Image: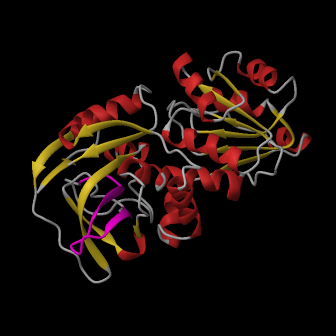
């Protein structure tokens, strides 16, 4: 079968097209003919050799096939959404039954891929970690991206009082406003605090959700009010944030938390009430997962380069 794989760690250039044997399903697994595979920052980290140790790291020798989410059909013709630790960038893959979910009618492949890793991330950022309360202000970094665009919409669905989006271009900021943000600003670290406070009518904010890290995370900490919460769930800037003194947090009773959805999926399975809610909201058009560019599987390198270059909006999809 056709697949994209990497035989050494590195950047997008290490991805190569290959003809590999079809996988075979074992007990508790299902073979899926892949219709579409999602692209995530986690895939980039995987081929870069990050997270190579620990219980959630992909296993096995090189070469490996990356990709953690697929939409496809089973041998019985059932259309499904599935999570895989690796192996998604291929014409066929094997999915553990506990990570396989039937798709409701009317949900497209790109939409379904968007609500698996990125949708569950958005849901848990707001509900499980930040514990959003009605009327609270929320700052969403990279709001035009796959996760950020879902966070903006879910924050509105969950009763946020004011949603402030950050994005890197006028086009992306305009899109965040279309999704339901009350304000959209430049997310650059320089001048960040002033722009956020201005967007929140001069008041500190309750919640900041950050996937950029580095100096942006440092600046975001200074915008939080009493009992404010900052949740970090990525570092697309690839820069290191400053160390945080506990005394700095104590003054305003601020919480800084981290979140990574993969351990949660591995422990609980991809299904469950949260994903069911996201798929239902999508089917009823209460949630609009943003589907960005689609690439032929052989152009997976281009997809990774575009994602790293922050030239994308929404979910990137590979078509085998």
Q: Is residue 176 left or right of residue 102?
A: right
Question: Image point 19% across, 53% down: which residue?
Answer: 63
Question: Image point 85% across, 31% down: which residue?
Answer: 204
Q: Position of residue 17 (x, y in %)?
A: 14, 44
Q: Is residue 140 left or right of residue 114?
A: right
77 part of magenta stretch:
yes
Q: Magenta segment range?
A: 65-83
Q: Position of residue 41 (x, y in %)?
A: 42, 42
* Relative depth, front residue between 150 and 25: 150
244 part of magenta stretch:
no
Is residue 178 shown above or below 209? above
Is residue 296 shown above or below 194? below
What is the total number of numbered labels drawn onto the structure image? 0
Residue 189, image quadrant: top right
Is residue 74 shown above or below 247? below
Kindly tell me whether residue 284 is visible in this rendering: yes
Q: In the rendered view of the protein, which quadrant contains the N terminus?
A: bottom left
Q: Position of residue 292 (x, y in %)?
A: 40, 36
Residue 178, image quadrant: top right
Q: Position of residue 168 (x, y in %)?
A: 55, 21
């Amino acid at each position: 079968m056709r697949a994209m794989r990497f035989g050494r760690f590195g950047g997008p250039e290490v991805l190569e097209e290959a003809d590999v044997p079809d996988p075979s399903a074992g007990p508790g697994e299902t073979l899926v003919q892949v219709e579409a595979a999602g692209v995530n920052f986690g895939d980039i980290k995987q081929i870069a050799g990050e997270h190579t140790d620990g219980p959630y790291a992909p296993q096995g020798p090189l070469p490996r096939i990356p990709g953690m989410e697929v939409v496809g059909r089973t041998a019985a013709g059932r259309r499904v959404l599935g999570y895989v630790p690796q192996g998604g960038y291929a014409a066929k893959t094997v999915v553990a039954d506990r990570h396989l979910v039937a798709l409701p009618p009317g949900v497209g492949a790109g939409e379904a891929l968007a609500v698996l890793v990125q949708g569950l991330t958005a849901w848990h950022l707001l509900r499980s970690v930040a514990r959003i309360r009605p009327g609270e202000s929320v700052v969403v970094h990279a709001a035009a991206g796959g996760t950020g665009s879902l966070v903006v919409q879910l924050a509105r669905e969950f009763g946020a009082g004011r949603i402030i989006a950050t994005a890197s271009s006028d086009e992306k900021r305009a899109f965040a406003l279309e999704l339901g943000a009350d304000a959209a600003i430049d997310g650059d670290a320089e001048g960040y605090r002033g722009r956020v406070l201005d967007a929140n009518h001069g008041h500190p904010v309750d919640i900041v959700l950050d996937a950029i890290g580095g100096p942006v995370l440092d600046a975001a900490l200074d915008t939080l009010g009493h009992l404010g919460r900052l949740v970090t769930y990525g570092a697309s800037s690839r820069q290191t944030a400053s160390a945080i003194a506990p005394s700095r947090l104590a003054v305003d009773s601020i919480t800084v938390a981290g979140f990574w959805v993969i351990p949660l999926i591995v422990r609980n399975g991809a299904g469950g009430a949260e994903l069911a809610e996201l798929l239902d909201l999508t089917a009823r058009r209460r949630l609009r997962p943003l589907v960005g560019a689609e690439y032929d599987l052989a152009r997976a390198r281009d997809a990774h380069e575009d994602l790293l270059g922050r030239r994308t909006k929404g979910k990137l999809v590979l078509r085998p």
